[in-house]
Amino acid sequence: MRYSLLTQQLHMGSMPFRSFVRLEIPDVILVEPVVFPDIRGFFAELYKRTDFLAGGVPHDFVQVSLSKSRRGVVRGLHYQLKPMEQGKLVTVVKGRVVDVAVDVRRGSPWFGKYVMVELSADNPSFSGYRQALPMAFKPLRMTRYSYTYRPRSTVHSMRGVLPGMTLKWAYHGRLGKT
């Protein structure tokens, strides 16, 4: 019964995303897809251009990458300089991570703040999106993490965050303080 409902919805083109939530730094958006579970597992669309445009994410993505990381490794902080900022849609394919985006834009009202969320393959309802902000993640167990990028640009890495700023990698909510 559930299988035929999913099939019917696929054919009707009705695969909406549940929500696009702007976090405390408005350039960071959590995307919650509709998940269709059944006896075989589940199905969820992770990207649909028309829904992303309607949800306020106006980027065409052009590249998908996958990384595998062991527990405790920190990946990032990666960022791009104007005019080559790079939006990313990230999701956890296997495992669990603490995912962070840092606002290092001088003059921004959120300068020096970071947004931290936990993303998990066990709860596929969340994908993180960040536009033109340094991003990083720390696996809480062996993880496969997928990045979907808007047009390719030159990537820069930061050794630290900002002078005097420390990231607290324990997940205690969405907004981190410096």
Image (cartoon, rainbow, N blue to C red):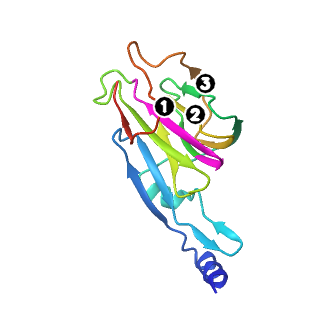
Whole-Å distance between the Cαs marked 3 and 1? 27 Å
- Label ID, residue 169: 1
Q: Is residue 97 magenta?
A: yes
Q: Amino acid at mark 3?
A: Thr
Report the side of 63 relative to 127 (left or right). Answer: right
Residue at 70 percent across and 41 percent down: it is: 66
Between 21 and 153, the one lying in front of the other is 21
Q: Quadrant of the C terminus?
A: top left
Residue 175 place in picture, x, y as percent:
36, 37
Residue 77 place in picture, x, y as percent:
54, 25
Please rate how many residues cluster around mark 3, counting C-alpha atoms within 10 Å: few if below 14, some from 14 to 19, many from 20: few
Residue at 52 percent across and 66 percent down: it is: 34
Please rate how many residues cluster around mark 2, counting C-alpha atoms within 10 Å: few if below 14, some from 14 to 19, many from 20: many
Q: Which residues are magenta?
A: 91-104
Q: Secondary structure at mark 1?
A: loop
Residue, disc 2: 138
Q: Nearer the viewer, mark 3 or mark 1?
A: 1
Q: Secondary structure at mark 3?
A: loop
Residue at 47 percent across and 37 percent down: it is: 131
Residue 6 place in picture, x, y as percent:
62, 78
Report the side of 139 relative to 106 (left or right). Answer: right
Q: Amino acid at mark 1?
A: Trp
Which sits earlier in the primary sequence, circle 1 or circle 2? 2
- Label ID, residue 154: 3
Image quadrant in which you'd find residue 11: bottom right
Q: Amino acid at mark 2?
A: Lys
Which sits earlier in the primary sequence, circle 2 or circle 3? 2
